[in-house]
Amino acid sequence: MNSFRNLFSRIRIGELELKNRIVLAPMATNYGTDKGRMTERQIQYYLERAKGGVGLIVTESNYVSFEGRGAANRLGLYEDHQIQEHRRLTEALHEVGTPVCAQIHHGGAIVSMKGVGQFPVSCSTIPILTRGEPYFGNIPRRLSETEIVNLVLCFGMAAWRAKESGFDAIMIHGAHGYLLNEFLSPHTNKRDDRYGGNDENRARFLIEVVESVRKKLGPNFPLMVRLTGEELFDGGYRIDFIQKVSKWLENSGVDGISISAGNYDELERMVAPPAFPEGYLSKDSEAVRKVVKIPVGVVGRIMSPETAEEIIKEGKADHVYLGRALIADPHFAKKAEEARKEEIRPCIVCNRGCMDRLMEGIDIGCSVNAAMGKEVSKRILPAERPRKVFIVGGGPAGLEAARVAAGRGHRVTLWEKSDKLGGTLSEAIVMPHKEGIARLVQYYVRQMEILGVTIELGKEVTPDAIEKIHPDVLILAVGAEPIRLGLPGANLPHVFLAKELLEGKTSLGPLVAIIGGGLVGAELAEMLVDQGKEVMVLEQLDAVATQAGYIVRKELLKTLCQKGVKILVGTKALAITGKGVLVERFGEKEVLKADSIILAIGYHPRNELVKNLDVGQMEFYKIGDCMKPRMIMEAIEEGNRVGFAI
Ligand SMILES: Cc1cc2nc3c(=O)[nH]c(=O)nc-3n(C[C@H](O)[C@H](O)[C@H](O)COP(=O)(O)O)c2cc1C
Ligand code: SF4
């Protein structure tokens, strides 16, 4: 029997019946056209998730009027010509039996002035701060009551267009600090007319939108509203307000509530970093569920079928929304249902491929799923000519190349120098919040077994060995070496490489200096401070952990500061002595005392093998960090590309 019995039970949201309780969360892809039109790429992205077994697809936000569009390549439902285009999506999904809900939305203050050719609009003239600056550098213009009435009609018309396009349900986006949420929150709503001043007035715009939408849809068409649960920042609302709003929505004919979190002052609650526990919003959905009879869904770092099942089983929500987990693996639901959960490719909660790219205004991708947004061109199909492939190196690049090549029918052998697969990933998992990375390594190990890749551990390759194996294709994915600074004193016994620390080959004193404030140095600092060390990070540049995206970096830096890590930027290490590190700061030299010193300066590509290699006629590729040390996303992308190229 399936161990996720509750998750795979049917549920009704109004007139809509879902075959299971897993819903694709709405996620802007930036795959649309600049006129808000649906593209084939978008259709294939959704279709893949439908085939992957979800009970319901909720599309990314569709703007209801032009000045509400979040960015250039978002979807729109603000003009009638979009009906025809959206119908292509609904027909494709209905063909595979998956219902689809359109999210409708107005970006409010979170709209680029450049993108809409005017100041963004909101309830009040209040800056929305991100990175300490007004978002996009704008401060919104206050909407007049006449304009609000007009927008209420725009929401109604957008819902009507969605219904005409063949959608099975509508979700009104009332969360995340966009227009409707800006009205709901006392943090942003400073009005003293009928749309502000007290709870009822702040909810008035949303309720009027619901009434307008309901009128256009008719009494029985499934309608949901997405809300930010508790706002934890100063001046935000608390869960009792959202309980009240949910009741009002239920009384206004809404069929389901979807609980999310955050706004642009608190992005980390919207798209959580790895430090947040799985299912961290289920307490909010549970609170709402207590006061309404309609189904309540919840989102928020639900990364495993176990977490999803637990939320449903314990009555914390009626259904779950999965965002990044379904970017990473579109077939999550199917695999969970078929008791193949160890085949799920896990999201590593890095935000690099998805949220960071979205915020940069470009099409989204995924660090672990190179086929994200390329579902057709990256479909694994048999190779014309199966060949003998030899891969050297079992890090992410080599493993991904092996997965794709073996999936296409090539005979693949992979040699790894150490005693385990994963390369730098296996080293990283000892650091805090790396559960996703650990799952990723397990995923690849399982894939190698399923695909029959011949794995040889503890095997160091030589030109002779390659000659003997004589493969048709040779792929070198041998990774990178940590850099040991040419600093005086770098070879003293109390100086260690980050790699040695991760491998557990060190014994540290109570006061530790980390030279190098990249992502590795910053993450090591958290690990060491958790072990009771006093830690300082010395960085020559003026910022640390810059390889991490905005949300992950903000959370990491906050944690380091809260835990008392001393971060010294603009600090150049000149020499290491028995007492500590001689540095130059602000033009002055000083010795910073430390018992142990960790070098986290970075990596350089491993090149020795290539130098002595005569590849002759053999087809030969070099991928991953041995080309140039970079992040997981680039390594997997290169492995994937070569797996398809051969
Ligand atoms: C790339 C990206 C785009 C998103 N776009 C939307 C959106 O258009 N509408 C919306 O309501 N939420 C949006 N979200 C938030 C997700 O729906 C979801 O709430 C969030 O990713 C947290 O869920 P997760 O931890 O399962 O990823 C987006 C999230 C991501 C990562
Ligand atoms: S880019 Fe990172 S956070 Fe986003 S879905 Fe992929 S693995 Fe998850």
Image: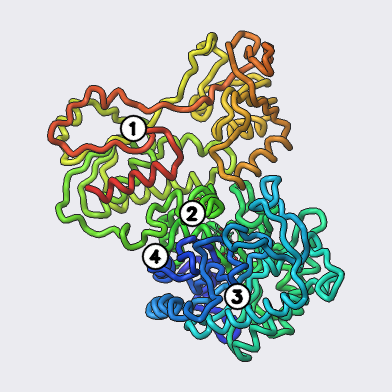
Relative image position of residue 447 (x, y in whole percent):
35, 51
Looking at the picture, does residue 597 appear above or below residue 180? above
Residue position for label 4: 41
| Separation of residues labelled 2 and 1 (CA atoms) | 31 Å
At 56% across and 41% down in the image, what residue appears?
548
Q: Earlier in the sequence, mark 2 or mark 3?
A: 3
Residue position for label 3: 171
Packing grade of label 3 (10 A; few <14, some 14-19, many >=20) is many
Residue position for label 2: 362
Location of residue 246 by image quarter: bottom right
| Separation of residues labelled 4 and 3 (CA atoms) | 22 Å
Q: Is mark 3 within 8 Å of ligand 1?
A: yes
Would residue 317 be seen by someone viewing this image from the given angle?
no
- Name the residue nearer the viewer: 21 or 47: 47
User: Do residues under tags 2 and 1 come within 8 Å of each other at their CB atoms?
Assistant: no
Q: Describe the element under mark 2 as helix, strand or loop.
A: loop
| Separation of residues labelled 2 and 3 (CA atoms) | 25 Å
Packing grade of label 2 (10 A; few <14, some 14-19, many >=20) is some
User: Do residues under tags 4 and 1 come within 8 Å of each other at their CB atoms?
Assistant: no
At 61% across and 42% down in the image, what residue appears?
553
Relative horizontal placement of residue 28, taking residue 38 as reference (left or right): right
Would residue 645 be seen by someone viewing this image from the given angle?
yes
- Name the residue nearer the viewer: 221 or 70: 70
